[in-house]
Amino acid sequence: LAKTTQPISMDSYEGQEVNITCSHNNIATNDYITWYQQFPSQGPRFIIQGYKTKVTNEVASLFIPADRKSSTLSLPRVSLSDTAVYYCLVGDSDDMRFGAGTRLTVKP
Amino acid sequence: SAVISQKPSRDICQRGTSLTIQCQVDSQVTMMFWYRQQPGQSLTLIATANQGSEATYESGFVIDKFPISRPNLTFSTLTVSNMSPEDSSIYLCSVEDRNEQYFGPGTRLTVT
């Protein structure tokens, strides 16, 4: 199983771009990279998923280098409501493991 | 996207009793998962429940303690048996639908 490593916490200010990097050195060929957002007292919410290169949706961008041993979640112009824990997962639908997550705090 | 509801949303239970948590999905899904999230920690997978087969438990979790039912493609239950204070946690139901995973709102369990 691919193990993920993320920073435990990050601080940012409103309007800034936030980049959260996740390391997954043992990623397997069939593994996808998925990011979730979790607010206090709620279940995790899917943000974005990718396999390689770059993926962008209305919420975030995901950058994956050619070796796929890491990935970076990019949140453009964060707001206070983006304060949450962000989890990077590597695996397929049959085998998903959550790491410790990154606690992002957005300050005014 | 799949919409998931759980009952109860929260409960306070006495040590030694059991609680059954229900998970209802608004669409038919093959794979359902049960997670536990202890205070301040990440999610831990308890078991995978596919309709028509026995649940598959992760290391550290056993069927006698966490029996699971999966009677159809839209419903599952997780029972926390013979509870102790260490079982105080949030229990989340999750489903895989069209290659995305969705989570329920969770059940906050406090064991006294």
Image (tube, coloured by chain):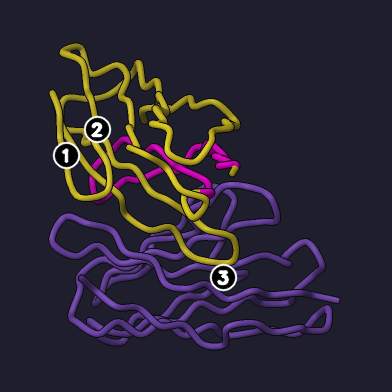
Chain colours: A yellow, B purple
- Is A43 on the left-hand or right-hand side of B9? left
Amino acid type shown at disc 3: Phe
In the rendered structure, does residue A92 fall within the stretch colored magenta? yes
Look at the picture and state if A45 lies above or below A14: below
Work out whether residue B76 or residue A99 is closer to the camera in this orientation and state it: A99
**Residue depth check, mark 3 versus mark 1: number of the one nearer the observer:** 1
Badges 2 and 1, same chain: yes
Q: Residue at x 38, y 31 (%)?
A: A17
Badges 3 and 2, same chain: no
In the structure shown, which secondary structural element does the residue marked by tag 1 occupy?
strand
Q: Chain of mark 1?
A: A
- Quarter of the image containing the C terminus of chain B? bottom right
Amino acid type shown at disc 2: Leu
In the structure shown, which secondary structural element does the residue marked by tag 2 occupy?
strand
Q: CA distance from mark 2 to mark 1?
A: 6 Å
Per the rendered image, the range of residues in magenta is: A83-107
- In the rendering, at what x and y percent does residue A36 appear? 38, 48
Badges 3 and 1, same chain: no
**Residue depth check, mark 3 versus mark 2: number of the one nearer the observer:** 2
Work out whether residue B88 or residue A63 is closer to the camera in this orientation and state it: A63
| Mark 2–mark 1 CB contact (< 8 Å) | yes
